[in-house]
Structure formats: C-alpha cells, structure tokens
Image (cartoon, rainbow, N blue to C red):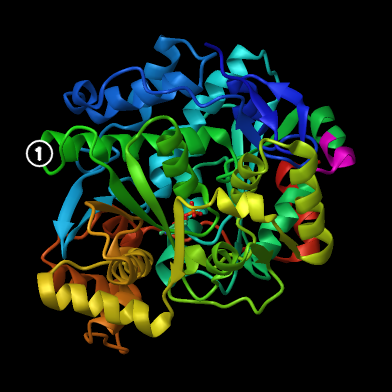
Amino acid sequence: MDVNYVSTRNKNEKVTASQAVLQGLAHDGGLFVPTSLPKFDKSFEELSEMTYQEVAYEVMKLLLTDYTKEELMHCINSAYDEKFDTEEIAPLVYADGAYYLELFHGKTIAFKDMALSILPHLMITAARKNNVKNDIVILTATSGDTGKAAMAGFADVEGTKIIVFYPKNGVSEIQERQMVTQTGDNTFVVGIHGNFDEAQTGVKKMFNDEALAKELDQAGYQFSSANSINIGRLVPQIVYYVYAYTRLLKEEKISSGEKINVTVPTGNFGNILAAFYGKKMGLPIDKLICASNENKVLYDFFESGCYDKNREFKLTNSPSMDILISSNLERLIYEIAGEDDTKNKAFMDSLQSEGKYEITAEMKEKLKDFYGNFADEAETKAEIKRVYDDTGYVLDTHTAVASYVYNKYKKESGDDKVTVIASTASPFKFTRSVMEAIGMDDPSKKDIELTDVLSEVSKVDLPGAIVEIKSAPVRHDTQCEVDEMPQVVKRFLNI
Ligand SMILES: *Cc1c(COP(=O)(O)O)cnc(C)c1O
C-alpha cells in the first residue's frame, strides 16, 4: 500500500515520501504526516533475528513506499556502517533498573547521527527520482547537536550545500568546537546573536520566503531542511525502538507481546514522536514518558492542555533540550485533533500570534499514552551522581533528565514495566557538566582536557569524535544578528 504525505495545515497538499523528504516543510508552513501508519508486517520474533540494517529496511519500507528496495538498502547500508563504533549500531545497556538505549555511537556522539547519517542519502535519492536539477541547500537551526550531525552527514555530498545556524552562547564548548572544525567545502557554520528558538524561527522564515526561493532557483539552488521536521529523519528514528524491543525479546528480558515503557529526553519532540508512531504501527509500548529540563513547556502542556511558550527561556546543562517551541508536537496535535487540518492550523496560528493555544478536553483525553515531567539543574546533576555512585555507569546530562523523570514516574505510579531510556548523547559531549555532577571537575582544565579524566573515571575509551577535535583546525568563524540570516545565506551562495 502506498503511503503519501499531507501537510498538517492543509490536507490538499499531498506528496510522495521522496517529495516530502526533498521539501522538508510543506508550503503552507505545516509538517508532512503520513496518510496512514501501516502495521509491521513481520513478527517481532522474526525481526529479532535480523541485524540493525535489516530491521531498518523492514521499518522504513512501510513508510517510504516510493523508494525501491535497492534504493532503501543502498541508503541504509551507506548510513549504518563503520561510521558507528559498534556493529550493533544502537546497543542496549542495563543499569540501575532500566535499559539505556545508547543512540550515541555515530560520528558526532549524539543521537542525531541515527537519522542524519541516512538523511543525505534519502535526499539525494529523492532528488534523482524527482528529476531535480538544482543543488540542494540544507538550512539548519541547531541547539548544538543537529548542526554537527547534519554537517557530518552532508559534508562533500555532491549536489548539496549545508548552512548551520547555532546560538553563539547557547552550546557547549565541545559542541561549538565540533561545529567550527567541520571539514567539507560545502559546509557553512554561523553563530547567531540569539537563542535556538530565534535561529529556528529565522530558518523557518527563509523557507517560507517566496522571493528568496525565486532568487535561489535562478541561481540553481533550492532549500531543504535537515531539521527534525523532515520525515526523512522521523522515519529512521522509529527503527531503533523496534530494534530495542526485538533485542529485549531475543535476550528473553521480555516475553512475546509484553509491553514496555519508553522514556525520552525531549526537546523538539521528534524522538518521542518516532516512538509514538512505532506504537501506532504495532510496537508494544505502553507509556511514552516525556522528560523535559527546566524549559518544561511540554510538561505543562501534558498537565494542563495548554501549550504556552510565553515564559523565560532558560539555558541549562542539557542545551539540546533548551527549546520552547517543540516543532514536532504539531504532528501529535494534528493526530489528536482527529487529523483535522483546519483545527490544527487554528492552534498553530494562535501559537504564532499569541504564543499559546489550548486543546479541547476531547483531545486531551487522547494523550493518555503520554506522561510528562521534568528535572531541574540540581536534580539532573544529582541523577548523574546517583547512577554513577550506584553502578559506575556515567550518563550525559540529557539522558540524566530522562533517567530522573523515569524514576519519578516509577515511584509515583508503581509501574515497573521493563523500560527503555533513550540515551541521547555520550557523556564526553558534555564533559564539564558531567564532571561537575560527579564531583570531579577541575576548573583549571579545558573541557577537552577533562575528557581524559572522564575516560579514566568511566572506564570508557575516548570516542573518536573527541580524539578528532583535539587536533582539528578551526575552519568557520562567521557570526551574525538574527535578522541578518538571509543576507548571510546569499553571501555564502554568491547570489
Ligand atoms: C536533539 C536532542 C534531544 C532532543 O530530541 P528531540 O527529538 O528534539 O526531542 C535530546 N538529547 C540530545 C542529546 C539531543 O541532541
């Protein structure tokens, strides 16, 4: 059965999967959603005998139906190869009463690699299939991890350029260093004088700017997005939840059909939405536990039914979750509004004009699968220390937020189902915060130098990504104001 994609704001805008991947965002500013979510057509027992790559094919073929088997296999095998430092791609590690699904074994040691190592291949394949002659310009706003992972994926991919905007003072030293040392003649990095939401809004504006699109087209370019709104990122993220379930099954940690809970440290709502889609496709997930940091707009939403971004933006030690507009939530809103594009558009218009919207009681009723909570800065640090003291396993700050919220949920509810916690970054990516948390910080050392100490403490070898940036030269130093973003893009493209 063919699955097509429609805009959450206008169901009449309908495209194929490959067109949705190419376009990123719908023309009306809406997000593409699949017209149906097919059920898995292999049993989880069968899937448990497969490799990560084979599971990826079985999941992705259901949603990217206009890609041929050869095309999908090529994309999958080009993405999930030796770039990952383990053949398992996404290993499950048991510690402290839960299974941590380590999604940080790719090139940039954060979970964004899971999707961004395959997106460039899906996109180039899509361009070929749709006879696109223009070069693709990827515009990306990043709170730290997406930018690097996207550049690593797109660097030197023929027919593409990638421009990344990040909040100049809103990312960790190691994140910034990873970005400004990026190689590839087609990569561009800009630190903006503003926060992540301003970067994201600036990028969205450029996508919706028709005059700019025309100028680009004349010069032989067109924009696309590598942000988590692209279904080419969402679909590959469903894979690792299926994979995790099948590994639990294979290792007899669960029995056939047994439901598990999933806990996800959440920012833009992409990762947890993938788990939700997986559940709708038949993966036995009970609760979807949504963990936020002090920017707890999602927790408040699940509590009250009111999404309200009118609040102070906080910089936390889990910067990749410092987000007040969780873009992917729009797909859930559309879903619980009964796939009503008009209703969804009204909410999003209200978000645009008032900074908030309130869903109906009937819609709120449909959110029962979700549990939301948050961890503040002190709780996050205490969680890292507690898990380290008890088990020797070192969590990064984002995963610690999830771990804290999971334990809070477990205590509150008494629900002791087997639980998978999405472990979204290596602790080495946030070395300073992690070392502070376990009481081993050394302020006289730079973050990069501290990684050696962390390696000793955690008994984990330095990841390749860290070894690399220790010696890599800085290649990017552009900064700009938020309203200068379009000019900077034109300058990079010589138009
Ligand atoms: C991006 C990111 C998140 C948030 O994921 P979303 O899909 O945006 O909700 C959490 N942790 C880390 C380390 C990230 O890079």
User: Which residue is painted at 71% across and 51% down in the image?
Assistant: 203
Residue on which the image places disc 1: 252
Q: Is residue 210 magenta?
A: yes
In front: 238, or 346? 346
- Give left or right: position of 246 versus 58: left
Type of amino acid under label 1: Glu
User: Which residue is painted at 63% across and 50% down in the image?
Assistant: 363
User: Which residue is painted at 17% across and 40% down in the image?
Assistant: 248
Q: Is residue 86 magenta?
A: no
Q: Quadrant of the C terminus?
A: top right
Secondary structure beneath label 1:
loop
Residue 103 visible at all: no
The region drawn magenta spans 208-213
- Give left or right: position of 270 versus 83: right
- Give left or right: position of 263 versus 252: right
Residue 282, compared with residue 387, is above or below; it is: above
> Can you give x and y, in whole percent of width and height, for residue 6 in the image?
69, 28
Residue 380 visible at all: yes
The total number of labels drawn is 1
> Can you give x and y, in whole percent of width and height, for residue 426 in the image?
30, 60
